Image: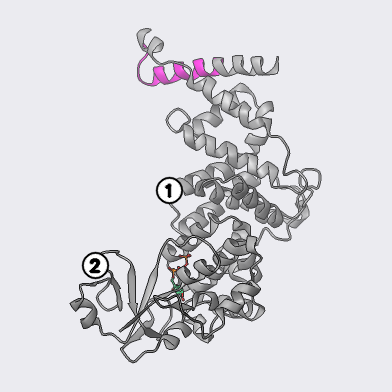
Amino acid sequence: MQIYKVGGAVRDRLLGKPVTDIDWVVVGATAEEMLAQGFRPVGADFPVFLHPKSGEEYALARTERKSGRGYGGFTFHASPEVTLEEDLIRRDLTINAMAEDDQQNLTDPYHGQRDLDDRILRHVSPAFAEDPLRVLRVARFAARYAELGFKVAPETLELMRELSESGELEALTAERSWKEISRALMENQPQVFIQVLRDCGALKVLMPEVDALFGVPQPEAHHPEIDSGIHTLSVLEQAALHQQPLTVRWACLLHDLGKGLTPEEEWPRHIAHEHKGLKLIKAVNERFKAPKDCQELALLVGQYHTHGHRALELKASTLLELLQSFDVYRRPQRFEEFIVACEMDARGRKGLEQRSYPQADYLRGAASAARGVAVQPLLEKGFQGPELGEALKRERLKALKAYKESASS
Ligand code: CTP
């Protein structure tokens, strides 16, 4: 049997990037031979094994044929006769379809190295269409390698468009899609992921609510970029530039969905878009079964981001309601994530990327003023149950009024 390093490990070594995961392909072996050597099978009828010591994945060379719709519809053919070239041709991109032996001799029948040099993400063969998840993968690689100048090849974008229009994307499971989306959002240029999905028509299928923002104008005075879709991309870009966590990036992507619902005659204003957007945010959250912390933050940022921007003008009672909505006493981190999401929203506007955002520290100060109200003295005064809750609220309101006064003096 011959063993080769394949896929991302070869690609990233050639790019001079750190290699984290190594995948191996085994040519000329049977499953029985692998088991006899101590490899552990990954699944019952999937020709992939884990190395007994390193735990790395070793896959028998295989060809794949799609036999039906969706991810279940695959048949695999793995046998000792399948060649390395046959295994490589069923892979997604030429830059992912190179193999290397233990002497670092490259097998590159589909010119992955040339495409690496030319900064092109190009599909290997029509077999690309066998897995619609690859539409998301290509967009993710475009986001990851945008800083190196990579672009999607026009013929690959065309194939991605055909796949998007064929209805195949709807067959992806929430789990597989979310894995790609969440990884893509954590790349350095997540806005490129959304842009590429839009360019091939996949955004309209996966997140029509986000797609609908493009072409919707906003008032130029606050939004020199005008277009709501462009604004969303810029907010996401800011979130990545400021190295925000996934929760914040997800909230940034979804914060303005309500603007896509505004009747044209009301453009460029978007009255109550925060509230109108909530049902759309909920739908996107549920479609991809986003983790609970992402879901919650997206809804809260959707509902309250304008409060964030107007923080300095809010009455003490409104500030208190805002803090209560976030349960800031038990979940201080979530409120901090809200604050930075608002800041990204404020900076994700053309020419305003460097603006200061005094609202952020002001909100932090308000949260600590409210959190500074101690429960013990109220308990000592004999307050209990709902009365204790009311008394706490009164004290917090007092603290916020004092805070507002001290902040404005
Ligand atoms: N692959 C593919 N189609 C997929 C998933 C994977 O063709 N839908 C192939 C590619 O050759 C890929 C390899 O399997 O390089 C390994 O896949 P994976 O570990 O998911 O990705 P990597 O390329 O290693 O990329 P990453 O750095 O994102 O993990």
Mark 1 — residue? 292
Image quadrant for the C terminus?
A: top right
Residue 59 visible in image: yes
Which kind of residue does numbered mark 2 sit on? Pro
Image quadrant for the N terminus?
A: bottom left
Toward which corner of the image does residue 161 lie, by quadrant?
bottom right
Query: Left or right of 351: which side holds 388?
Result: left
Position above or below: 367 against 139:
above
The question of residue 389 being in magenta is answered with: yes
**Residue 52 — which label?**
2
The x and y percentages for residue 72 are: 37, 77
Question: What range of the chain is rendered magenta?
Answer: 382-398
Tell whether circle 2 marks a residue whose Cβ is less than 8 angstroms from ligand 1.
no
Tell whether circle 1 marks a residue whose Cβ is less than 8 angstroms from ligand 1.
no
Assign a secondary structure to mark 2: loop
The x and y percentages for residue 66 are: 42, 85
Q: Residue furthest left?
A: 36
Q: Which SS type dominates the magenta stretch?
A: helix
Instruction: Decide which of tag 2 and tag 1 comes sooner along the chain.
Output: 2
Q: Going 57% across and 75% down the picture, which residue do you hit?
A: 164
Q: Residues within 10 Å of mark 2 (few under 14, many from 20)?
A: few
Q: Residue furthest bottom?
A: 81
Position above or below: 203 against 356:
below
The x and y percentages for residue 330 are: 42, 30
The x and y percentages for residue 107 are: 48, 82
The question of residue 153 being in magenta is answered with: no
Colour option used: one colour
Viewer-nearest residue: 36 or 350:
36
